Image (cartoon, grey):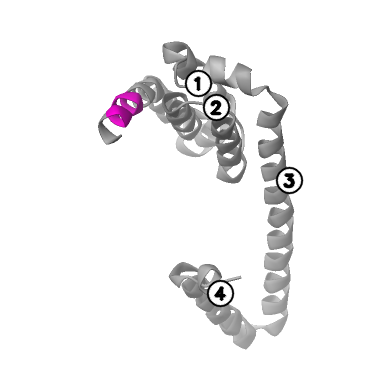
Amino acid sequence: MNAGKIFDPTTTIFGLLALILFLLLWVKDPSVAKTTAQSGLFLFLRYCLLIVFSMMIATMLPALISKEIITEYLGGASGWRGVVLATLIGGLTPGAPYAAFPLIAGLIRQGMGLAPAVSMVCAWGLWSVGRIPFQAAVLGGKFTFIQVLVSLPLPFIAGKLSGLLKKFIQ
């Protein structure tokens, strides 16, 4: 394994920051430093398992659906039907990027086209059902309603534009 890939500038900065904060806490109160370090390690282990399991589920789900079905309904030739279906799936996909992106990547490997994939990513990012309640609680219902309403057409537009852009890039 290449150590340069693990310790990039961001990782190094965060590692140094964590060490500095730990040392500051140690000077202030060693028991607090130990408790917070243990909490951080526990959180790390918990999220490591969560990420591994989420990625496993996300990569297994597309394998359960035949390549022919994915190509027919979400493939490059699926047109508006594929964009609409992918947008709905994206909006209904719960979870963080470590769960959603492997799912989308698995669908792409199984034959999902560019336009539906872009639509799915946009819908998940703009109005995933898992995030809407949290957004409303933090930013307010009125803001969330307006944000969702004005962003409703964006995944469709992005999907269709990506299909057009692909023709110019090839």
Q: Is residue 2 left or right of residue 149?
A: right
Q: Nearer the viewer, mark 4 or mark 3?
A: 4
Expressed as whole percent of the image width and height from the top left, the position of residue 78 reads 47, 14
Residues shaded magenta: 161-167
Residue pointed to by mark 3: 53
When the figure is inspected, residue 136 is found, relative to residue 96, above or below; the finding is above
Name the residue: 44% across, 71% down: 9
Nearer-N-terminus badge (1/2)? 1
Residues at discs 1 and 2 in contact (Cβ within 8 Å): yes
Q: Is residue 154 left or right of residue 17?
A: left
Expressed as whole percent of the image width and height from the top left, the position of residue 147 reads 39, 28
Split into 4 quadrants, where in the image is the C terminus?
Answer: top left
The quarter of the displayed image where residue 169 is located:
top left
Nearer-N-terminus badge (1/4)? 4
Query: What amino acid type should be assigned to the residue bearing mark 4?
Result: Ala
Residue pointed to by mark 1: 75
When the figure is inspected, residue 128 is found, relative to residue 81, above or below; the finding is below
Residue density around tag 3, few if under 14, some if 14–19, many if 20 or more, within 10 Å:
some
Cα–Cα span, label 2 and label 3:
24 Å
Residues at discs 2 and 3 in contact (Cβ within 8 Å): no
Name the residue: 62% across, 41% down: 99
Residue ranking furthest to the top: 81
- The one nearer the camera, 39 or 128, is 128
Residue pointed to by mark 2: 111
Residue density around tag 2, few if under 14, some if 14–19, many if 20 or more, within 10 Å:
many
Split into 4 quadrants, where in the image is the N terminus?
Answer: bottom right
Residue pointed to by mark 4: 3
- Is label 2 in a helix, a strand or a loop? loop
- Is label 3 in a helix, a strand or a loop? helix
